[in-house]
Amino acid sequence: MIIKKIESNFKDARGKITDILCNQQIDFVTIITNKKGSIRGNHYHKKTIQYLYVLEGSILVASQFEGKELKQKILKEGDLLLNEPYEWHAIKSLEKNKLLILTKGPRGGENYESDTFKLKKPILT
C-alpha cells in the first residue's frame, strides 16, 4: 500500500489545478460512491494496478500481501492510494464518500470481474 497526499500544482483566483497522476498509462477511470459503513474489496488482482483517489469523505483502507503484516490507514479527501498486483485490499466507508479509481490492466468495463479474486477470509469487516 503506497499512499500519497496530492497537492495542487497551480492556484489562482479562478481555482486550482491538481495533477493526480503523471506519465501513467490508465485503461479505466471509475467513480465509486459509498454510504457510511459500506465495505468494498476484500479481494486482490493478479494483473491489475489500481489507484484510488479520495474525492470526498473518508475511508479506512486495509492492505496485505500474503504472509505479510496487515496495514490499515485512514484516507481523506486528496489522498491517493496505490494497490499493486497480488496485494489484498479492502475499504470501509467512515462517512459518505466519493472515490476516483484509476486502473491499469484488465479490471474494467466488460472485464470488471475477470481479474478479481475474493479472499477466503476478509481483511476488513
Image (spheres, rainbow, N blue to C red):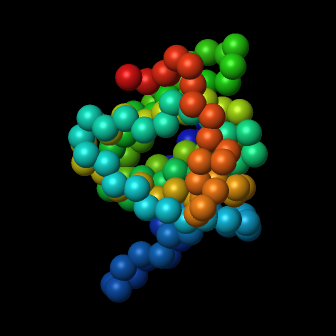
Residue 2 placement (x, y as % from top left): 62, 39
Q: Is residue 50 visible?
A: no
Q: Is residue 82 above or below residue 125?
A: below
Residue at x 26% of width, y 35% of height = 37
Please, which residue is most extreme toward the bottom here? 14
Residue 70 placement (x, y as % from top left): 56, 19
Residue 87 placement (x, y as % from top left): 66, 32
Picture quadrant where residue 22 is located:
bottom right
Q: Is residue 23 above or below residue 89?
A: below
Front-most of residues 41 and 15: 41
Figure quadrant of the C terminus: top left
Front-most of residues 85 and 52: 85
Residue at x 25% of width, y 46% of height = 35
Q: Is residue 109 visible?
A: yes
Figure quadrant of the N terminus: top right
Picture quadrant where residue 19 is located:
bottom right
